[in-house]
Image: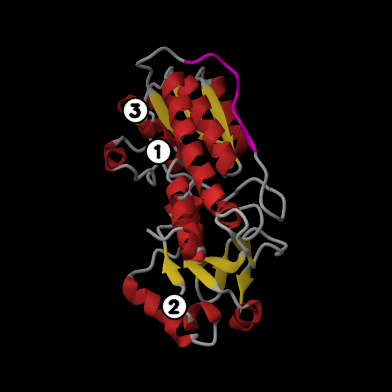
Amino acid sequence: MIRVRRALALAGLWAVAALTAGCPGPDAALSGASPPQPGARVVSLAPNLTEMVYALGAGGRLVGATTWCDFPQEARSVPRVGSYNAPDLERVVAARPDLVLIPAEGEFGRAFHDRLRGLGLRVEVVRVGDLDGMLRALTEVGRLLGVQDDGEGLAGRLRVEVDAVARRLEGAEPVGALLAYDRDPLVCAGPGTFGDDILCRAGGRNLAGDAPVSYPRYGWEEVLRRAPAVVVDATQGSERDMEWWSRWDALPAVAAGRVHAVDPDLVSRAGPRLVAGLRQVAAWLHPERFAP
């Protein structure tokens, strides 16, 4: 289970906000303060927020990020201020930021925000509940960085891509699928997760969408009973690891050769690459709609 927590924390979402049990609805909010002056020093306390800053062309302003802020490559050279789960207050303060971006879903909670504010730092809390929320957050982060036009432009381009996927899937019968984050037991994307949102938007029927928790754990008897036609494996395994699935040839997805490995960041990290993940999963679920 430790590996699951690390994988999901790397994606910046271990404590994802609760959404509806079906295809999640929109949820994104940031505070409405005016943006800092261009050239401001920024600390990002989540991998997805770091990606947004770079995607908006402002990566050079970052003076602090978490140990798990690993994309793009340049982000790995930004000074570390602790982990996603446990940022170091002294390191954040020592970076002398003009703006600290904090995820609403972070495990460190409101007390950490208040301590930073009490020290006179400007803190903006970013809440991103689903793909729509990520697009709105891009616009807002752009505003906070003083590059609002860039934020609106990028969000608009990504929205066009999301809508293009939706058009291709019009009238398609949903395909029963599971998105796995770990094995033995299988830990899947349940309701209120980005994985659930991606599966729904990609023309799937999330077979773990009825679970009472966000990340249900299933024994193999239950997996066989649910009989997914497609499995999306986000366990960060190698191609050799994917051979593990071959033992379960009674599973429809395995028998049909429809078990697909995906970078977990593309289906769980709440940044711009979610759109690439959506396109890929949709092509796996409905290859007939995405043939060259």
Q: Which residues are magenta?
A: 27-35
Residue 32 located within the stretch drawn in magenta: yes
Q: Earlier in the sequence, mark 1 or mark 3?
A: 1
- Work out whether 114 lies above or below 127: above
Which x, y percent locates residue 14?
55, 51
Which x, y percent locates residue 135?
53, 35
SS under mark 1: helix
* Closer to the camera in the image, 264 or 89: 264
* Amino acid type shown at disc 3: Gly
Dividing the picture into quarters, in which one does residue 71 lie?
top left
Dot 1: few (<14), some (14–19), or many (≥20) neighbours within 10 Å?
many
Horizontal placement of 236 versus 31: left or right? left
| Overall secondary structure of the magenta section | loop
2 vs 3, front mark: 2
* Closer to the camera in the image, 118 or 47: 47
Q: Earlier in the sequence, mark 2 or mark 3?
A: 3
